[in-house]
Image (cartoon, helix red, strand yellow):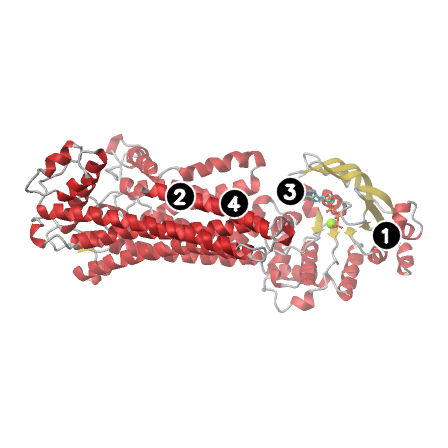
Amino acid sequence: MPVLWLFLIIVALSAFGFIAGRARAYQSAGGDVRNLHSLPGYYGYNVALTALVPALAVLAVWLLAQPMLIENSVSKMIPDEIIAEGSNRSLVMSDVRRVANGLDLAVSSGAMTNDEVNALSTDTSDIRATLGSIGVALGSDVSPEVLAAAQSYRSKSYTGTLVMTVVVLLLAIGGLALAYTRTHKDFRARNVVERGVLGLLIIAASLAILTTIGIVLSMLFETMNFFRLHPWTDFFFGGTWSPNFRGDSDLSILPLLWGTLYISFIALLVAVPIGLFAAIYLSEYASNAVRSIAKPLLEILAGIPTIVYGLFALLTVGPMLVNVFGRGDQGLLGVEWMSGATSVLTAGVVMGIMLIPFVSSLSDDIINSVPQAMRDGSLGLGATKSETVRQVIMPAALPGIVGAILLAASRAIGETMIVVMGAGAIAKFSLNPLESMTTITTRIVSQLTGDTDFASPETLVAFALGLTLFVLTLGLNILALYIVRKYREQYE
Amino acid sequence: MNQMTSVEKNVNTQDIKISASGVQVYYGDTHAIKDVDVEIEDKTVTAFIGPSGCGKSTFLRCLNRMNDTIDVCRVEGTILLDNEDIYDRKVDPVQLRAKVGMVFQKPNPFPKSIYDNVAYGPRIHGLFKNKADLDNIVESALRRAAIWNEVKDRLNAPGTGLSGGQQQRLCIARAVATEPEVLLMDEPCSALDPIATAQVEELIDELRTNYSVVIVTHSMQQAARVSQKTAFFHLGNLVEFGETGQIFTNPEDPRTESYITGRIG
Ligand SMILES: Nc1ncnc2c1ncn2[C@@H]1O[C@H](COP(=O)(O)OP(=O)(O)OP(=O)(O)O)[C@@H](O)[C@H]1O
Ligand SMILES: [Mg+2]
């Protein structure tokens, strides 16, 4: 039975449970709602949720676990000898899955019966041709071991799904029956539903946290693999970044970190004044009409995908800067300081533009949270608006704005697409903003794209870089949140 | 109410400092002030009394154009300060507010040190010659607002860390330090104990020798004690305006009488 049907049946059962539970509660109260402990709907929800939630939870876990377990046991059927040179077990296993799926298709399209499939053997028929005729293309002939594994895969999946269907249905019906029998006018359905809702909310929250932990752990393991292959002193304290595939790469984060921080610095130099002034204008000076138009417009900037900013850097800002700072006599300044469109300045300026709405909307919130009484007090003493902003609002909002800037900085440090397209690929320490440089994120992308070998330090370094980046931005975010929160308390 | 007899004899005719006529205030569709005419004399204390929500603060805020900061607020009619229309285009509200200072109903010290709070106005308007001069201004403002003894040892502590009543006096000091010609005080003693109240009333009396003071108060006794003129507001109307002694002893309007004797409010 397809999973969709199973799901629909559970939902239908639970809907039925809702109606039945409500009706039973009504009845037990003799038709008078006032005799019930809770509103009738709560009894319905109680039955519906008891039927639905455990069954769905088991279904979800089963669907995740079953393929892994089957894969594991089937994979043991494949002896090491048949894994060809240059191939590996996971490639063979994907063959097994393809064959198994092909056989499923053959049965469902009527080309073969279930028994024929189970009796199939490589000696008597050409499986590649048979499967090819129903539209499943295989890369090579099917070896007997693969076929056997595929057959076992199929039968295990079949039994697994069957057992799952039965278990899930039993759970749903059992939950429904249990909750239904417990439905009585004195039963505290409202409290039970409340606890159920609490449970759901906790699960949602912990899922989010668990994924974060999972991500960090997986990064951590790969990073540890990297440090087994490469000295950590070189990574943290070395001076050059030059990966090669002869095995003597210099993989130091410092030049990349330099590029990252330099570009982020320029981005903040662009974003902070413009964003802050825009926020001050919008919250202190603009009339309602202007604000209602300008604010959404500014926020549209925040919705532009960063790849579009990257294109903007590559096609517009870069060439424009070259026109000013490069091209010798043909350039605007008549100098030859910049050769290519990619540079720290290009990436920094475009990233700054990207961050403007981020800074401005955060600062806007913070400025608006300064109480009106502060403005009144200052204006009432004969201060002008800008004096009020400078001397009362800014000092009051400063910690919050510092927090906003730190958040913007952590976004700048983690930004990828703009620097991939605008910053260049050369890792070096240089103060010249017209040279192209590279960042941590760009290098992660380039180390993980193309041919990768997850056993070489040149690839694994990406995880070490990623983890460092994560720690860096996490630290900035925590600092920023701490500052923002501390400031919030001031007026409450 | 025997204090008011002493005030009564001080009343003498003065120049008109502020003259409001036909003032209407709307908050969106709410008509908060209905056709109010008041003349506020120089070197006089004028009290605004009336039940909560009758528009005392609103009218007070018209006198230094603080209502400009409220988007939905609309003011009609004419208000003359020294015979100049303060709602005229030529008038700069910023300059006006330096001349017509205000103490707000809720204390609103800036999140700065006590010293900087008081020095705020003098600094903005450049009212001092040197640091020692500024120190003097701050000290005398704090003394006049009857808070100097409590804060003289912690002038660098934040003003927001003071108690409610102390904040109220700090705000009075802040307004006084700017040397306004007219001081508008919206319930300046609402959070003060009797001793501090008496000190603030003393300050008001002292200010009267040079400035004109408008004070909103819910305390009949206070109005009687400090003011020479009293205006009674009710539901946005100015019901009665006249000599304080007369309003309290012999009100013309029955509404005034019932408010003063505590029957409406
Ligand atoms: N910012 C505002 N927006 C809309 N309506 C307002 C605003 N401020 C005051 N009002 C309305 O104007 C009327 C007068 O308010 P105002 O604050 O002047 O009263 P008040 O006499 O000072 O009262 P209280 O003695 O309680 O301070 C009230 O009905 C109030 O609801
Ligand atoms: Mg008021």
* Label 1, residues with CA under 10 Å away: few <14, some 14-19, many ≥20: many
Looking at the rendered structure, whether the residues under marks 4 and 3 are on a common chain is answered as no
Q: Please name the residue that numbered disc 1 is placed on.
A: B228
Q: Which residue lies furthest to the top in this view?
A: A330
Q: Which residue is drawn at 32% across and 47% down?
A: A263
Measured Cα–Cα span from mark 4 to mark 2: 16 Å
Q: The residue marked by circle 1 belongs to what chain?
A: B
Query: The N terminus of chain A lies in which quarter of the figure?
Result: top left
Q: Please name the residue that numbered disc 4 is placed on.
A: A19
Res B207 → quadrant: bottom right
Q: Is B190 left, or right, of A404 in this rendering?
A: right
Residue A35 at what x, y percent from top left?
A: 64, 54
Question: Which of pointers 3 and 1 indicates the residue nearer the eye?
Answer: 3
Query: The C terminus of chain A lies in which quarter of the figure?
Result: bottom right
Question: Which of pointers 1 and 4 indicates the residue nearer the eye?
Answer: 4
Measured Cα–Cα span from mark 3 to mark 1: 31 Å
Q: Please name the residue that numbered disc 3 is placed on.
A: B69
Looking at the rendered structure, whether the residues under marks 3 and 1 are on a common chain is answered as yes
Mark 3 vs 1: CB contact within 8 A: no
* Label 2, residues with CA under 10 Å away: few <14, some 14-19, many ≥20: some
Measured Cα–Cα span from mark 4 to mark 3: 57 Å
Measured Cα–Cα span from mark 2 to mark 1: 85 Å
Q: In which quadrant of this rendering is ligand 1 seen?
A: top right
Q: Please name the residue that numbered disc 2 is placed on.
A: A9
Three-letter residue code for mark 1: Gln
Secondary element at tag 2:
helix
Residue A131 at what x, y percent from top left?
A: 15, 36
**Is residue A390 visible from the viewing direction of this image?**
no
Looking at the rendered structure, whether the residues under marks 2 and 1 are on a common chain is answered as no
